Image (spheres, rainbow, N blue to C red):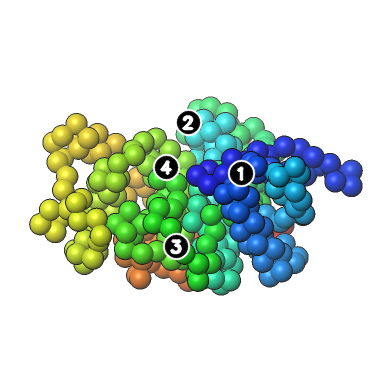
Amino acid sequence: LHTFVDFFILFFRGGSQIALKIIKNLEKYREAAKLEINVLEKIIERDPHNKKHCVQMLDWFNFYGHVCISFELLSLSTFDFLKANSFLPYPINQIRHMAQQICHAVSFLHDNKLTHTDLKPENILFVNSEYSIVYNTEKKCNERRVNNTTVRLIDFGSATYDHEHHSTLISTRHYRAPEVIMELGWSHPCDVWSIGCIPWHGPYLLDMGVHLQTHDNREHMAMMERILGPIPQRMIRKSRKQKYFYHGRLDWNEHSKSGRYVKTKCKPLRKYLMSHGRDHHNFFNLVETLLDYEASKRVSLSSALSHPFFTTSSDPGKRQSWRNSCDLGR
C-alpha cells in the first residue's frame, strides 16, 4: 500500500476468528485510517445486511497509537488462488459469478458517491477458498477448482468520495486507467477500467496483469495501444502529459528494445480469445466495453450488469448452476 503499512492477523471475537488490520503508529497513517473507517461505516450504514459483496468492518479501536480495525475473516484472494493453481484460468461460469459480484459491489460504491481507486485481484477475497481437485483434459493435468465463488471486495484505504480531493496518482500500475496516466481527471469510470483489467480469468486474456512488468507511463500506453488500438486524438489533445506524445500520437519507437518487448508480449485483445463459444465471445465483448479509452463513453457498471455475459449462457446447466451460486452469495 502507498499510504500506510498494515498487517492482517487472526484474532478472536466471541469465540470466532476475525481479521485484524493494524495501522502503523504515525500521524499520516492514523489520518488515513480515519478516512477508511469513515468509508467502512458508510458501507455498514448503507448495507446493514451485507448483501453488496464489500467486506464488513466489525469494530475499530486505538492501541497505543496504532489504529486497529477488525473485519470478518475471509480466505485467499482471487490472485493468490490463481497463483497457487499455476495460473490456470477459472472456468467461465466462475468468472461470471465473481465478475457479477464485483460489478455489484463497485456499482454500490458509485451509487454512494465513492470511487474505490485500487481494484485488483489481491483486493478480491474468497469467503471460502476450499477447493476440489479436477483433471483438466485440455492441459492434461490436475487443477484446483474452488468450491464456492462467493467473494468480498476489500481495502477501502484509498476510496475517495466525489467531493473530496482527487489525487493525481491512483490505482496499482496494471489496473490504472488512461485518464489517470494522462492527467485528464478521474471519477467512477477509472474503477470500471480496473475491473476490465483484472486477470481473474488467468493469463489467457490480459497478460498485462499477470506477466508484463512496466514502471514507465509511455511503455504502459504502448501496451494499451497494442491491445486496444490507438489512443483517441481528443484525449491526447487534452492531456496534461504532452511529453508522451508527438504530433498527436504516442511518442513510441516500436523498433527499440522496449518496443520489441511490447510487440512480442502484447497482441490485439481479440487474439487472446481461445474459445469460440458464445459465453467467451460475450465475455470479450463485455471487457471491450469496460476498456473504452474515453471515460465518458465507458460503460457504467449498472449497465454492464445487463450485458448478455451476465444475462445469458450457452449452457443451460451452467446458467442454472451460476444462478444457484449467486443465490448463495446473497
Left-right relation of 144 to 178: right
Reading the image, the residue beneath label 2 is 139
Mark 2 to mark 3 CA distance (whole Å): 45 Å
Position in image of residue 270 (x %, y %): 32, 51
Q: In this rendering, which labeled residue sits more in front, label 4 or label 1?
A: 1
Reading the image, the residue beneath label 4 is 209
Q: In this rendering, which labeled residue sits more in front, label 2 or label 3?
A: 3
Tell me if residue 60 comes above or below residue 302 in the rendering: above
- Label 1 Cα crowd, 10 Å radius (few <14 / some 14-19 / many 20+): few
User: Is residue 64 visible in the rendered structure shown here?
Assistant: yes
Looking at marks 1 and 2 on the same chain, the residue that comes earlier in the sequence is marked by 1
Tell me if residue 60 comes above or below residue 253 in the rendering: below
Label 4: state its secondary structure: helix
Label 2: state its secondary structure: loop
User: Is residue 123 visible in the rendered structure shown here?
Assistant: no
Q: Which mark is residue 166?
A: 3
Q: Looking at the picture, which amino acid does disc 1 mark?
A: Leu
Left-right relation of 238 to 39: left
Q: Which mark is residue 26?
A: 1
Q: Looking at the picture, which amino acid does disc 4 mark?
A: Gly
Looking at marks 4 and 2 on the same chain, the residue that comes earlier in the sequence is marked by 2
Q: Looking at the picture, which amino acid does disc 2 mark?
A: Lys
Position in image of residue 316 (x %, y %): 58, 59
Q: In this rendering, which labeled residue sits more in front, label 3 or label 1?
A: 1
- Label 3 Cα crowd, 10 Å radius (few <14 / some 14-19 / many 20+): some
Q: Looking at the picture, which amino acid does disc 3 mark?
A: His
Label 1: state its secondary structure: loop
Tags 2 and 3 touching, CB below 8 Å: no
Q: Nearer the viewer, residue 283 or 134?
A: 283
Q: Which mark is residue 66?
A: none
